[in-house]
Amino acid sequence: METKEPIRIKMNIFIPNQILILNSIFKEKGFENYIVGGAVRDAITGKNPKDYDLATNAIRYAVISLLKYKYKVLEVGKAFGVVNVIIDGHEFEIATFRADSDSSDGRRPDSVV
């Protein structure tokens, strides 16, 4: 079977300054940080994203320690490695990269690694 190269599409997406700030904080400490979820879907479908979720290789404790002295940090999803941060009145959900186990309902994992 012949493998095909992935299709790459360049697109313009508005990225709020707060996310650029977060990205520089994570990058400075050697962590990755990506926009994920609905914002990506919205951009692909030509809509302006209304909210932005982020994913990082930093564990929850590292996310908290990176941000807690400068921004309001909400520990909303301890079991799933999720932290919310509020910058200039805008709230962003930051999740640690994870692998979900099989789930009985297809939406909520039984466990997270």
Image: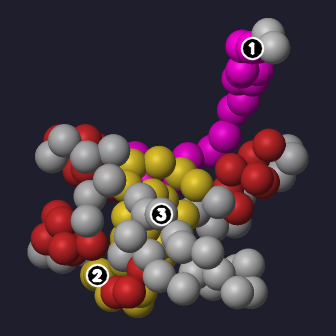
Separation of marks 2 and 1 at Cα, in angstroms: 47 Å
Where residue 11 sits, quadrant-wise, is top right
Q: Residue furthest top?
A: 2
Specify the segment rendered in magenta: 3-20
Residue 77 in the image: above or below residue 93: below
In the rendering, which numbered label is found on residue 107?
Answer: none
Q: Which residue is mark 2?
A: 72
Which quadrant is home to the C terminus? bottom left
Judge left or right: residue 36 versus residue 113: right
Q: Position of residue 61 (x, y in %)?
A: 19, 73
Task: Verify CB contact (< 8 Å) between mark 2 and mark 3.
Answer: no
Q: At x 58% / y 81%, what residue is drawn?
A: 109
Q: Position of residue 24 (x, y in %)?
A: 28, 44
Separation of marks 2 and 3 at Cα, in angstroms: 27 Å
Q: At x 44% / y 76%, what residue is drawn?
A: 112
Under tag 3, what secondary structure?
loop
Q: Position of residue 75 (x, y in %)?
A: 33, 87
Under tag 2, what secondary structure?
strand
Where residue 14 sits, quadrant-wise, is top right
In the rendering, which numbered label is found on residue 99?
Answer: 3
Q: At x 25% / y 46%, what residue is drawn?
A: 31
Q: Which residue is mark 1?
A: 3
